[in-house]
Amino acid sequence: MLSQLAEALSQIGDPRPAFDADRCLNYRHHHAGQCSACADACPAAAIMLTPVPDVNAGACLACGVCSAACPTGALHGLRSLADIWREAQAHARRAGTLELVCRGVGAGSFEAVSIPCAAALPPEFFIAAAAAGIPQITIFTACCDGCPLCEAVPQADRAVQTAAVVLAQLGLTLPVVRQEGTPRQAASKPSGVSRRSFFNTLLNPRPQPPDSSDALAALLASGLTARRALLLLALNRVAVPAAASLPAAPGNWGALAVEPACVGCQMCAQLCPGEALAATTEADGTVQLWFDAAQCSACGLCVRACFKQALHFTPAVKISMLATSRYEALWRGHVPVNPLKSQARARQT
């Protein structure tokens, strides 16, 4: 097992994930309270927060676990979630089900989609798979107990469990089975096309199911993370019950509420890495804060950065709010002359 993983790692030049500083919560506000999602999730203890993540290339196992854990998509593994999803769709269309194989199984030409680790898949991947009609996912692994990434197994389990909560509200299920072993070897295909198969294809073309690749590319181009793009695709494929709601899940989704202490300083909108918060100013100086739950990953930066402690997440969020991206009014008022004072004192001066 270890030798197979070492061999796979030897074929990787720099195993460290790419880093998008503009999305990193610690980079956007050094003093708002450190986000440690990537460092906490790393099974190799390869990430030191300075406060931005500094990844030790010698210790990094290129497992993608930090990418799956990051709420804002600031880290990008060698195998992007978007690429894995596209391959997964193509595999499911061919096979009728989805088989994944982790890197620990070893090199080979398998009839399965290669993933770095089972823990590299966030909940949104499984939600999207169920909404796309995939009946089951089988993940082939080596012995996880003997793998250097074994500490990431609980994260893999949490992702499946979190997805199951969402799917239950949508009336969907998706069995996810992890088993030790090796998937089928990919069958070698004869080169060229026979005359008979050419004419059969020409005269009897097979209808192709719809492919959401273009929709995914469009959502990614709009600035959404791959995780949030997959969730939007999934929720727009199924009928969402109007009253269905989910418990707020930090790092996944949430809905904001504002307290009377808000002074309209707009810092929350300026710091939000996903543009879930926006601010507008009218001609008379009135400030309006807007919130879009479909773009919010519940990273919590706005809550931690608010010097008036005027923001908090509600206990639950309606799924319909996550399915349709739209800004709704969150707060409206005038900014006091001195925002550092309380609103009562500001009105008196």
Image (cartoon, helix red, strand yellow):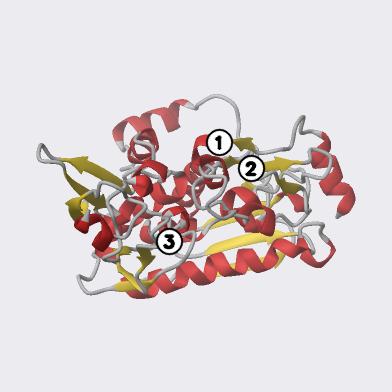
- In the rendered structure, find residue 52 and report the number of the disc placed on it: 2
Residue 183: give x, y in percent of width and height: 68, 55
Q: In which quarter of the image is residue 133?
A: bottom left
Amino acid type at image mark 1: Ala
- Whether tag 1 and tag 2 are in contact, CB under 8 A, the answer is yes
| Residue at 85% from the left image edge and 63% from the top image edge | 146
| Residue at 28% from the left image edge and 45% from the top image edge | 278
Q: In this view, does 346 lie above or below 202?
A: below
The mark nearer the N terminus, 3 or 1, is: 1
Mark 1 nearby-residue class (10 Å; few <14, some 14–19, many ≥20): some
Label 1: which secondary element:
helix
Residue 166: give x, y in percent of width and height: 39, 69
Q: Report how far apart the C-alphas of labels 1 and 2 lie in the structure.
A: 8 Å
Amino acid type at image mark 3: Ile
Q: Mark 3 — residue?
A: 127
Give the total of numbered labels: 3
Residue 225: give x, y in percent of width and height: 44, 44
Which of 244 and 305 lies nearest the eye of the viewer?
A: 305
Look at the image and tell me whether residue 242 can be seen: yes
Which of 182 and 19 lies nearest the eye of the viewer?
A: 19
Label 2: which secondary element:
loop
Q: Report how far apart the C-alphas of labels 3 and 2 lie in the structure.
A: 30 Å
- In the rendered structure, find residue 21 and report the number of the disc placed on it: 1
Q: Which residue sits furthest right? A: 3
